[in-house]
Image (spheres, coloured by chain):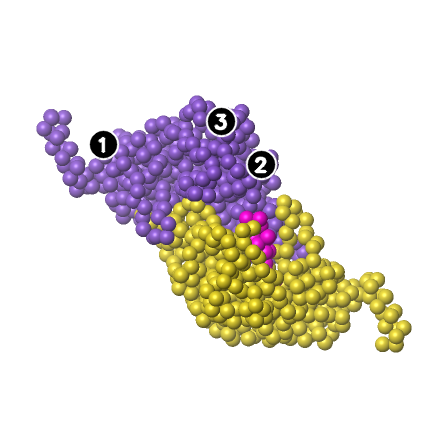
Chain colours: A yellow, B purple
Amino acid sequence: MAKMVYFDRVATALLAPEAKKAVANFMNDSVGNPSAHIHSAGIAAGTYVDKSRTSVAGLINAGVNEIFFTSGATESNNLALKGFLSEKNSGEIIISEIEHYSILDQINNPALDRFDIKTLKVDRNGLVIPEKLEEIITDETVLVSVIMASPEIGAVQPIKEIARICRKHGVTFHSDATSAVGYIPIDVKGLGLDMMTFSSQTLGGPMGVGALYVNSTISLNPLFDGGNQEMGFRPGTENLPGIVGFGAACQAISPMMADKSSRLTELGRKLWRGIEENIEHIEFTGHRESRLPGHVSFWHRFVEGESLLLHLNMKGVIAASGSACSSNLKGSDEHDLRASHVLTAVGVPEEYCSGSITFSLDYYNSEDEVNYVIDILPEIVHRLEAMSPVYEDYMKQREKHGR
Amino acid sequence: MAKMVYFDRVATALLAPEAKKAVANFMNDSVGNPSAHIHSAGIAAGTYVDKSRTSVAGLINAGVNEIFFTSGATESNNLALKGFLSEKNSGEIIISEIEHYSILDQINNPALDRFDIKTLKVDRNGLVIPEKLEEIITDETVLVSVIMASPEIGAVQPIKEIARICRKHGVTFHSDATSAVGYIPIDVKGLGLDMMTFSSQTLGGPMGVGALYVNSTISLNPLFDGGNQEMGFRPGTENLPGIVGFGAACQAISPMMADKSSRLTELGRKLWRGIEENIEHIEFTGHRESRLPGHVSFWHRFVEGESLLLHLNMKGVIAASGSACSSNLKGSDEHDLRASHVLTAVGVPEEYCSGSITFSLDYYNSEDEVNYVIDILPEIVHRLEAMSPVYEDYMKQREKHGR
């Protein structure tokens, strides 16, 4: 198999053919700046933005005026928290302990020192227990933010139940749904969300564009000063090619999403079973059922995740170790070798936390690709085990005890 | 002439063929998230970013580590001011009175109440007088920000002289060079700039991407919390297609820029003279010589700019009235009918300030297009004059006085 097997959808999906075509068509149309309402080239540009907004809103059952385009999920998460909190003087914020760095680092930023931060623990499967939220939410709570699905361990949270508790207490609820949108059915109204972050790149659109859903009852301050774009929430000329591709990707996913997503779930289960049945010393992470379709994550007791990835890569298979976004040393290009806070949260021993593997499949992946990975993985693991002194010790112990 | 004559480069240039081709090629390459250093798809993505950064830096003689990609000029302006000022407790900020809204609105934001704001006046031609800066700069001044070239009136500022004064006083100097980069030669080192904002869309690259040049001696705080992208200055997955197109546009402009720019200056002068010689009651704005190549801006004493634009548009000509970015009513889609602060600054009577016309030509424009506009403009003006009650009064007065 010379072709690349790309199983890193949660870092970024490959560009969907529909998105590629839409961007290429857009680039052949000579349009102006959408803010130049005064001439036909500007009006033509505005039409592209409107059409795309309708497609994006449609995928999550939002009103078109509740979708604000941003430069991506990081900006959306920053707009949601900074934009919402900038007018509050104090109070409590509750976040889960497995948030993305673009939430976590905001909470740790001294700029939010005026708020009390409470952390919502997850269980061994990476799931928030709604009753725990009931226990810690108070009249002082101003905002709850819980990631909808973890890119690292795949766990899908009981968002509807969390939203119900927030609503009951009159607390604004934001969810970072970057890994979830387009892969699990999301109805922002039915779920009761106040704000929701998502991005284009994780669902087959171009990198560099995202959106924030903001329920029309919620008021935010923009992060930038300047023009009136995105109804004043997000000044700056719109990323038109990005927005066009984002809309096309959403529109491509919408029809029969339930069917496509079921097939992806099956592919993921097949990969999970293939690994489970053929490789020893594996520990899967996240919940077996309540997880992203096509997402399989695990760690191995004797083999380093990074080595495993490099060997997979040499065989044409692209997968992730932890989160692609976990590189977090400001002002440095080095890797972040700290243990992932998500893995420690679900009880993975710290010495294994830099070594987890995440396969995230997409609609374009095939059963052949899954079979290929199931075929080559055991041999790679065995070769690496043979190089592991810890594994050698373990085998000696096992022989001694006659196991 | 059925084809569109696009003379609104400062709002957004049409996509350069080189940028279009580079983005299309990029979209056919299956690359991952550049932060996924661990696998070949991520490394391939990073290579695209590096190559582009080199092209962008080369156009302005910056170091590659001094270029930070953003979502556009608005974000760059916000990063420059907010990022630089967030660690200062007090002091004075000096800006020119003809800044873009993404500078002006930051200065007017109550978040900067701890600073004293001083405004640098411009003369009738829209030029800052460096001696005036010498008069108002003090030991308390922490930042000076002056736009390099006004998109509205085309005036190009004496940036080197302004930078020299700032350096002499140890004051950090930022310039918004969005309309200038790619059209006038810029050497950030030779000019003595500390920070410079520019964008892709105004020089033939895609919308939705820009850059901030930050001299390696300057320290900024990022606007977003999150990942380590752009050396920590700008967390969030990079806008890869945008960055690729931006780099290609810079690379296409670099060779023989002086020649191309001279030709554009000639085209602009031809248009200026054609208007001057064939149309009465015109007042040009900005400086006749110290201006953007191919930029012609004026107002007419009896004809509304917007009407003129609509009639031009019906004949296939795209031009601007004031700045495309002047729409500035937060939370509303309506036009901003306030007088442009740039036009009032250069002494245009307030009642005419919503009615100026800006032609901004680009390298792709031809002499035929200029001749076409010179041909059709007088007739349009005469038709509109005939409908103007003010013009009727004026003509009656003129006849009465035998002029």
Tell whether B2 sits left or right of A103: left
Crowd tier of the residue under label 1, counting other residues whose Cα lies within 10 Å: few below 14, some 14–19, many 20 or above: few
Spatial CA distance of label 1 from label 2 is: 50 Å
Residue tagged 1: B280
Callout 3: residue from which chain? Answer: B
Mark found first going from the N terminus, 3 or 2: 3
- As displayed, is residue B3 above or below residue B84? below
Residue name at image x 85 percent, y 66 percent: A392
User: Which kind of residue does numbered mark 3 sit on?
Assistant: Thr
Spatial CA distance of label 3 from label 2 is: 20 Å
Residue name at image x 40 percent, y 61 percent: A217
Residue tagged 2: B218
User: Which kind of residue does numbered mark 2 sit on?
Assistant: Ile
Residue name at image x 47 percent, y 49 percent: A223
Q: Who is closer to the viewer here, A385 or B139? A: B139
Same chain for the residues under marks 3 and 2 in the image: yes
Q: Can residue A113 be seen from the camera position used here? A: yes
Residue tagged 3: B138
Q: Nearer the viewer, mark 3 or mark 2?
A: 3
Q: Secondary structure at mark 3?
A: loop
